[in-house]
Amino acid sequence: MTTTLMLGTTKGAFLLRSDDGRQNWSVVGPLCDGWPINHVVGDPATGHLWAAGGGDWHGAGVWRSQDDGARSGLGFRRPGCLPPRTEA
């Protein structure tokens, strides 16, 4: 069974993956456009990964991957912002 460690750092998110024996590891990243990332979580049932972070300059951000980061993190996308609120 492959093991994946999901790391949030000041340089972005990283995925560390091992083989079945945990003898060989590969690193995918930095992900999330190099933003500081505080949290990375995954759902093994769906393969979705979520990362959250941000900083003083750009504010907060949330990223998601719907393919377990399989495309070397290219699946990580920052969801669009909410549309402007209209007054009723």
Image: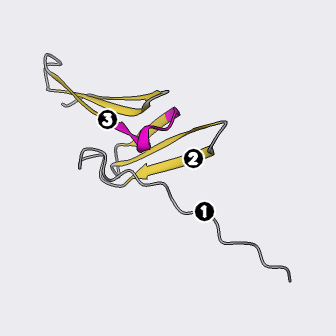
Tell which residue pokes out farthest to the bottom in this image: 88
* Disc 3 secondary structure class: strand
Mark earlier in primary sequence (1, 2)? 2
Say which label, 3 or 2, has the lower sequence index: 3
Residue 11's quadrant in the figure? top left
Between disc 3 and disc 1, whose residue precedes? 3
- Report the residue at 44% width, 51% height from top: 64
Is 16 above or below relative to 23?
below
Farthest-out residue, top: 23
Mark 1: amino acid = Cys
In the rendered image, residue 43, in percent from the top left (x then y), is placed at 40, 44
**Picture residue at 67% right of the left edge, 36% below the top:** 56
Q: Which residue lies furthest to the front in this view?
A: 57
Report the label total.
3
Report whether 79 appears left or right of 26. right
**Could you give the CA–CA distance between mark 3 and mark 2, rounded to whole angstroms?**
17 Å
Q: Residues within 10 Å of mark 2 (few under 14, many from 20)?
A: some
Q: In the image, which disc is placed on residue 61?
A: 2
Q: Give the residue drawn at x 64%, y 40%.
A: 57
Three-letter residue code for mark 2:
Gly
Spatial distance from mark 1 to mark 2, Cα to Cα? 10 Å
Q: Quadrant of residue 84?
A: bottom right
> Does residue 28 show up magenta in the picture?
no
Which label was assigned to residue 29?
A: 3
Disc 3 to disc 1, C-alpha distance: 24 Å
Judged from this view, the residue extending furthest toward the right is: 88
Say above or below: 3 vs 53: above
Residue behind mark 1: 81
Judged from the image, the secondary structure of the residue bearing numbered disc 2 is strand
Which region is colored magenta?
30-39
Q: Where is residue 76 in the image (x, y as percent from the top left)?
A: 38, 50
